Amino acid sequence: MKELITVCPRNCYSTCTFRVFTEDGRVVRILPFEGNLATPEGPCIKGLSYLEREYSPERIIYPLRRQPDGSFARIGTDEALTIIAGRLVEARKNHGPHSVLFYKGSGYSGLSNEIAGSFWRLFGGATTTYGNLCWPAGLEAVRLTLGEVKHNLPWDLANASMIILWGKNSAETNVQELIHIEKARQNGAKVVVIDPRRTLTADKADMLIRPRPGTDAALALAMARVIIDRGLTDKEFISRHVSGFGQFAASLQITPDKAQDITGIPAQTIIDLAVAAAGAGRLTLVAGFGLQRYTNGGQTIRSILSIPVITGMIGRPGCGFNFANLQSYIFDEVKEPLSYYPDPGTDKPFRRAISMARFGPDFFALGEPAIKFAWIERGNPVIQLPASAEVRKALESVPFKVVVEQFMTDTAAMADIILPAKGVFEQADVVGSYWNPYVQYKPQVTDPPGEVLPESEIYWRLAQFMGLNTGEAGIPAPGQYDSWLMERISHTPGFVREELLQKPVIPDQNEHPAYGNLKFDTPSGKIELLSDSAAKLWGVNPLPTFEPLNDLGEERLPLRLMTPNIASRIHSQFGNLEVVRSVVEEPAWEISVADARSRGLRSGDRIRVFNSRGEVTGKVRVTARVRSGSLVFPNGIWLGEGGGVNRLIASSETDMGHGAAFHNTRVDIEKLVP
Ligand SMILES: Nc1nc2c(c(=O)[nH]1)N[C@H]1C(S)=C(S)[C@@H](COP(=O)(O)OP(=O)(O)OC[C@H]3O[C@@H](n4cnc5c(=O)[nH]c(N)nc54)[C@H](O)[C@@H]3O)O[C@H]1N2
Ligand SMILES: Nc1nc2c(c(=O)[nH]1)N[C@H]1C(S)=C(S)[C@@H](COP(=O)(O)OP(=O)(O)OC[C@H]3O[C@@H](n4cnc5c(=O)[nH]c(N)nc54)[C@H](O)[C@@H]3O)O[C@H]1N2
Ligand SMILES: [Mo]
């Protein structure tokens, strides 16, 4: 048996390291790698399921072409690439390069993804997307306040005396974080969860606080007011390191009583929580991504962040604000937060871009040239983008579509040609993370099956068919890929290449505790509670404020729709695997006991969920885990399994960062008679 150390390249906080064993070129076993202090217990069920995923009989391993009757048939790789190259050249010649849409999702992370950008640049540009479905409102809120987006090492949580998991469901979306939270608890720390749902994480906490969705800023600002009114701030820290404190303090209109009306949390609970947080000594506040997927998401994160700021809990062990840690995310464009926004000055010649959150309306507003060719990789936009019915219509209007995929997803099913995508073990790469501080090398472990080619090679071959000169373009020839990767790493400061090939490496420049030198890369050089940039860039109040949710014209609908992530999937991935199906319940529409009773619903009943945008049908599950007034269904469920929640969701952006305000949605339901 051969053993290698590798890493899971999914878009997930944890980015687990694991040991993989092969026999006769086939992966036979996966075990934890204890040397990664963030993920010593190894991967979750999804990582373990790679044993099945890579060899699944449902995997697409040959190029497929749509037939006149709508079915797919296998074709040769050269034939597929010749057809694609011909279509690309034709589109560019007749309509210009911007008639080609390049859409990339978040299905795979690794340095090799850069090669796609090199190809489309060499092609002469394309229409692409800007913004992001995931986290940009929060990233921008943290950047505006602290200058950079980083936090302490994951295992530093063990040093905290109080941990507030604010809209973070670690037990499902970052399960390894619980290892460090459990250590803190053993050391006597108190753990509080703030989430409208009674999550699996809440089951492991000392206290659960359940605000109405989208009202967290009111809760946070009321807490800040209590802390200030009672003289519990860190005055020296504020005078040295915080800009705008006076204006912030003077602006706080939300009393605990008022916050009770807005959030539904008793005023006394708000006061007690504020006093406990200010007196904790070592408070780490961990904010998830779910609560910033609202029209007020950026302002919400700024409001919550004010609590560790005014109590001086920044730049010390056991303290801080954990949203994302981009210190090892060194290869991804988001490192320069504004660089992926449309920049008419520099970007236009190469790129025409539409907002990811507003994909449907922006697509139809594109003007000339219209999209004649779409290339989709690493993503499943037909079900993961908001207003998905419009997204489908947009893609239906495109005469020729290529999807690079491992499985027959709802998006792949719309392709004219499907190119099979590489599996996790089939190409070497380097992977960063937004939580795990390590940069990790992912060796090639097995050969790809069938005619699977990694994207780097698809692009190189395609360029040859099109007569493009890849020489200087950063698109390595097949035999040159490994040296391309090593060359690329060698430009990154703080790397010992040989060490990286052996085990995960924390870059030299990793700062711990984060902001330990108390230097902040903001215009004032201080932490900015008052941010002129926030007002200038995004048109929001320069101070953190509570903004009631914009209900997008559907105020009268009774239920707020929440579409969180679940343990058994990464968004739309993994749900098709036998091992995953064998351990999880079928997805169902979760509703509170009170809302179920008033509608005469019982678990197992079928319902129609609807609003002005569309409808979805499915089974209900009545549960005490859901707050009354909310309806919960996970995102990522395929259409054939009863998914399609994004049909109900509007294409609206968050207040900053061009994120998607998925959770602003209101719906109504109706019992279906069997
Ligand atoms: N197993 C698994 N792990 C994952 C993923 C996955 O799909 N599955 N996805 C990965 C990716 S790409 C991402 S972006 C992250 C997502 O990780 P998170 O963003 O943390 O996950 P979500 O489930 O969207 O939201 C977290 C919690 O926020 C709560 N929430 C929603 N609205 C509010 C609100 O208004 N106030 C408060 N206080 N809480 C609220 C939800 O109930 C949920 O429990 O996880 C990563 N890890
Ligand atoms: N309603 C609602 N919708 C949401 C969210 C929500 O909270 N609510 N969350 C949003 C968030 S946070 C995110 S990050 C997005 C995620 O949405 P997407 O970015 O679309 O990501 P995935 O659903 O993970 O799908 C990725 C696809 O990539 C494929 N893939 C995997 N590896 C490779 C590879 O190496 N090459 C290629 N070519 N393909 C590969 C997988 O098979 C999978 O089909 O969804 C968003 N959608
Ligand atoms: Mo995400």
Image: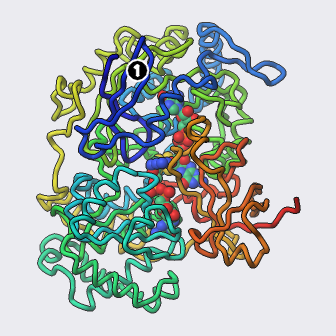
Say which residue label 1 marks: 427
Question: In the rendered view of the protein, which quadrant contains the C terminus?
Answer: bottom right
What residue lies at 14% left-to-right and 62% top-to-bottom? 518
Q: Is disc 1 placed on a helix, strand or loop?
A: loop
Give left or right: position of 350 versus 499: right
Whether residue 120 is visible: yes
**Where residue 600 sits in the image (x, y, percent)?**
79, 74
Whether residue 356 is visible: no
The answer to whether 418 is drawn above or below residue 460 in the figure is: below
Nearer to me, 164 or 417: 164
What residue lies at 61% left-to-right and 15% top-to-bottom? 62
The answer to whether 258 is drawn above or below residue 501 in the figure is: below
Colour scheme of this structure image? Answer: rainbow
Nearer to me, 12 or 203: 203
Q: Quadrant of residue 232?
A: bottom left
**Where residue 574 sits in the image (x, y, percent)?**
55, 38
Q: In which of the image's four quarters is ligand 2 placed?
A: top right
Nearer to me, 23 or 535: 23
Give left or right: position of 299 versus 485: right
**Where residue 115 sits in the image (x, y, percent)?**
41, 24
How crowded is the residue under tag 1: few (<14 C-alpha within 10 Å), some, or many (20+)? many
Nearer to me, 465 or 108: 108
What residue lies at 43% left-to-right and 62% top-to-bottom? 201
The answer to whether 630 is drawn above or below residue 355 in the figure is: below
